Image (spheres, rainbow, N blue to C red):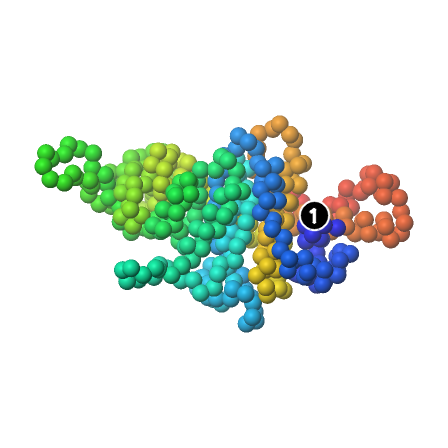
Amino acid sequence: MTLMTTIFVVCGQVNYTNLSRYSDYCERTYRRHFEAGLGLERLNQALIEQVIAKDSPQIAVVDCTFTEKSGRHTYGLDWFYNGKTQRAERGLEWSVVAVVDLAQKTGYALSAQQTEAGLGAQESVTTEGTTPPKSRVDFYLGHLAYCTAYFPATIRYVVADGFYSKYKWVTGVVQLGFHAIGRLRSDANLKFLYDGPQKRRGNRRRYDGKVNLAEPSRITFVETLEEGVSLYTAVVWSVSLKRRIRLAYLLKEQGGRRSYVVLFSTDIDADPMTIYRGYAARFQIEFIFRDARQFTGLADCQARSPEALDSHVNASLMALNVAKAALQATQAKGEPPEPLSFSIASLKRQALNAHLLDLFTATFALEPTLIKSHPSYQTLLNYGVIAA
């Protein structure tokens, strides 16, 4: 069996010991191959190009995930933010870049890189003439730059959550030839742009007052997304990002209370609905993290070296891509792409059932053609599968 097939057959933790129990390779063989590195980015690129329709819009999504790790000698151990506990903990962090198909509403992991230890989460203040130390934002930008060689040609937007809404990140994304989409703080310092007549003397007037995010009276209404939720837009100046940005302002009014979310894009000509849909699709990377943890062993690695850790995490993420590609292959060709809806738990159960049937067939020297052509074969494959 291949590595990806074995990952779906394994019951329990996906580690070297368990992988060897369900395949013909011993634990030491898995350790040796993982130590050598797998380099799965090009395979992910080919798989993504195969499953994504050419006329379907795509975006790149960047985010980090935290994995617990015991011991003291694992490479890259440091204090990182754990979203599950809402605090910093000692463990490992992985920067993940994914491609999200907006028509399918499905994300495909492209690459994962381990965040280096010892990097500051924020920019350090340095004296004039000195080189500032490398920060985590620098590392994330380096990972993004590495992944651009594997991006589909149609990608224009890089979407990230509010942590990445910093001057260095946004500027880096633009320098790479893309537009950034993200979320701003509710108290972001924004200014309206002045487009009226200018005085004959003195400096030109650039701004027309500060944007009051609690009151969108001067922001252009676009449409009502659902009951009580309205979308507004404007081109404004961001003081923190030091550039003009296009706002996609969401205002929710319910029960006499008002709340709002401020999304933005560096593409000032972007449709605000594109910004809204792009940021909403960002959550597909969270589903990738969830499924990889629950079903493909994202946090089950037994290794300590950087090469083996990298191989394990990327193999775990690629296994999800293979599962989605297998589901995509069952859909009728020529039809417009639709959102994928499936259960990883059911796919794992079907893979295990197929493995057991093949094992029984080989052990009892049965004729495989007769077994697989039997009307009840598919019923046995679906034994224990979650009902649709």
Q: Which amino acid, by three-letter code, is at mark 1?
A: Val
Residue positioned 55% across, 31% down in the render: 54
Q: Along the line of sight, which residue is nearer the eye, 322 or 242? A: 242
Instruction: Find numbered disc 1 in the image and state the secondary structure of the residue it sits on.
Output: loop
| Vertical position of residue 28 compared to residue 328: above or below | below
Residue positioned 75% across, 61% down in the render: 26
Q: Position of residue 375 (x, y in %)?
A: 82, 38
Q: Along the line of sight, which residue is nearer the eye, 125 or 334? A: 125
Residue positioned 77% across, 50% down in the render: 355
Viewed as shown, does residue 156 lie left or right of 325? left
Quadrant in the picture for the C terminus: top right
| Vertical position of residue 262 compared to residue 86: above or below | above
Q: Along the line of sight, which residue is nearer the eye, 325 or 262? A: 325
Q: Position of residue 22 (x, y in %)?
A: 75, 57
Instruction: Looking at this view, name the residue that lies furthest to the front.
Output: 129
- Label 1 belongs to which residue? 385
Specify few, some or many for label 1: CA neighbours under 10 Å numbering under 14, 14-19, or 20 or more.
some
Residue positioned 54% across, 42% down in the render: 150
